[in-house]
Amino acid sequence: MIDAHHPRAGNTEIDSPARRAMVYVVDDDFDVLKSLRFLLETEGFDVRTFRSGSALLASRTRHDADCLVIDYKMAGIDGIELARKLRDLNVDTPIVLITGYPDESILTKASLAGVRQVLLKPHLEDSLVASVRNFMETNRAAD
């Protein structure tokens, strides 16, 4: 393992630590929000949480996330409507929609709203981390 805070032998420059990817999580269930935050932080991501779609829309930093994880069923604005509103505001950040209530048309509705991935609760830990990492790698390759 290479320690970014100490120069390698023969290297006189100190490597600066890489910026950690920022993930915004939006869910109106506090326990789910806390669990997702813990999962993603454990995997090395910086995480900012929002208890509603309105809170994210009101945030001046809504463009700063590298990936958005949004719950489908929320009070007020649901996840698909939130995705539409974000796209209307030119937020092009990859969106992962999570749901415990799949229906036959959710994939179509999500795709039309600009959602890149739909994952099912409650067993989404591995697939969520893999999806977020995949979006980060794709974005880095595009830069």
Image (spheres, helix red, strand yellow):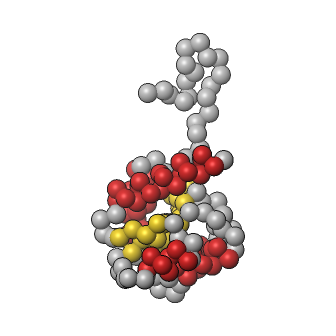
Q: Dividing the picture into quarters, in which one does residue 34 lie?
A: bottom left
Residue at 54% in and 30% down: 4
Q: Residue furthest bottom?
A: 76
- Count of residue discs: 0
Which x, y percent locates residue 29? 40, 76
- 127 lies above or below 33: above
In the rendered image, the vertical position of residue 18 relative to residue 10, given as above or below: below
Tell me what residue is drawn at x 38 percent, y 82 percent. Answer: 104
- Residue 85 position within the rendered picture, expressed as x and y whole percent measured from the top left: 63, 79
Quarter of the picture containing the N terminus is top left
In the displayed structure, 133 sits above or below 88; it is above
Q: Seen in the image, is 22 located left or right of residue 102?
A: right
Any part of residue 131 in sight: yes
Name the spot of residue 136 as percent of width and height, x first: 54, 51
Q: Which residue does the image show at 59% across and 12% down from the upper left? A: 10
User: Image quadrant of residue 19?
Assistant: top right
Residue 38 visible (yes or no): no
- List the single residue furthest toward the left: 123
Instruction: Please determine whether, in this image, residue 126 is positioned above or below residue 25.
Output: above
Where, by quadrant of the figure, is residue 81 drawn? bottom right
Please state the horizontal and vertical placement of residue 9, each as a whole percent of the image. 55, 14
